[in-house]
Image (tube, grey):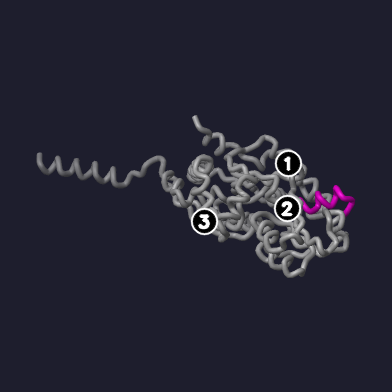
Amino acid sequence: MKTRLILILSAVLFVAGCSKPATTPGKVIFAADVLTMAAAPVYVAEAKGFWKQENLDVDIKPFVAGRLALDAVVGKVADAATVTDIPVVLAAFQQHKVRIIATFTTSEKHENMLARKDRGITGPRDLAGKKVALVPGTSSAYVMAAMLQRNGLKPSDLTTISLKPPDMVAAIVRGDVDAIFTWQPHIYNAQKQLGENALVFPSNDIYDSPFNVVVLDTSDASRIQALRHLIAGLRAATQYMQANRRECVEIVAKKIGTDVATVDNLWDQYSYVLTLSPALVGQLEKEGAWAKSSAIVTADSAEPVYPTLVDRRIFDQNRPQ
């Protein structure tokens, strides 16, 4: 009888030791643009342990631009990326099954044009014949094209060069370029150094800079579960940021390598709320038309099925009850 009881207890302990909680989601490799104010909820989620509370191991891989982070997802070396919508459209034109599963930051002042006044620039119309830096294939290129179009110019009317955002700051301060198109806090950093010689034009009604979580289409249930917990951690971060501004400003300043005053000055230009707007599909269609008209993609490129680029499954399952 004693031996039988020991065997029964051993079997129970074996089953208990081998079974895992149904909520254990595992690990996510998260490719993130880490030099931008837009990524603030990512920094807060990591610093405050919101993913650990979800029992999720998030390995953040740093990139200097969202387009490069998306390349990591397309190359299947990362599970998710932080990126605006422009690179998503361009990836879709290349037949990659990219999907936006959430937006966690928006801002009409994230993308800007900054120019040197001493080069005779008073607005976008004065860029003809000037040397301008941007990151091709990103939202900065889209904003530049839209600003030029409004002022009767084309990208071919000026000389453009490709630079990483931190390098743009040094280039315009030295006078190597006449203007730059990029995002915060790089615009702010250049403006501080140029002082009265700087002229800034925000994107405003041109573009609201939706900063998204993007993945490759998958039917793997375990991956869906992990991504659900990834989004839950970001939701917790955005909610925490509403009530704990000072602490979160300090977290972000440390992460992006700038001073607290800079981050605090820019903070109110952003809306840190987890959303997935129905209007996003229409914006993607507009950007697709721009990509074709600008010859960024060939005229005979297969048009993406834009509604499929926004996958609501994970977002809808993460809504507060």
Q: Position of residue 60 (x, y in %)?
A: 52, 56
Relative to 166, residue 7 above or below: above
Frontmost residue, 127 versus 92 = 127
The quadrant in which residue 125 appears is: bottom right
Question: For mark 3, does the 10 Å Cα neighbourhood hold few (<14), some (14 to 19), or many (20 or more) residues?
Answer: some
Q: CA distance from mark 3 to mark 2?
A: 27 Å
| Residue hosting label 1 | 283
Mark 3 vs mark 2, foreground winner is 2
Position of residue 282 measured from the top left corner of the image (x, y, whole percent)? 73, 38
State whether residue 267 appears in this view: yes
Residue occupying image coordinates x 73% and y 41%: 283
Horizontally, residue 182 falls left or right of residue 55, namely right
Going from the N terminus, do you reach mark 3 or mark 2 first?
3
Q: Nearer the viewer, residue 227 or 271?
A: 271
Query: Residue 112 got which mark?
Result: 2
Residue nearer the viewer, 214 or 19: 214
Residue type at numbered disc 3? Ile
Q: Given the image, on which type of amino acid does mark 1 rest? A: Gln
**Disc on res. 60:** 3
Secondary structure type for disc 3: strand
Query: Given the image, on which type of amino acid does mark 2 rest?
Result: Asn
Q: Please check the rendered image and state whether residue 10 is part of the magenta-colored stretch, yes or no.
A: no
Name the residue furthest front.
196
Q: Are marks 1 and 2 in contact (CB under 8 Å)?
A: no
Tell me what residue is drawn at x 82 percent, y 64 percent. 118
Magenta stretch: dominant secondary structure: helix
Q: Which residues are magenta?
A: 143-153
Residue at the (69%, 52%) spot, across then down: 87
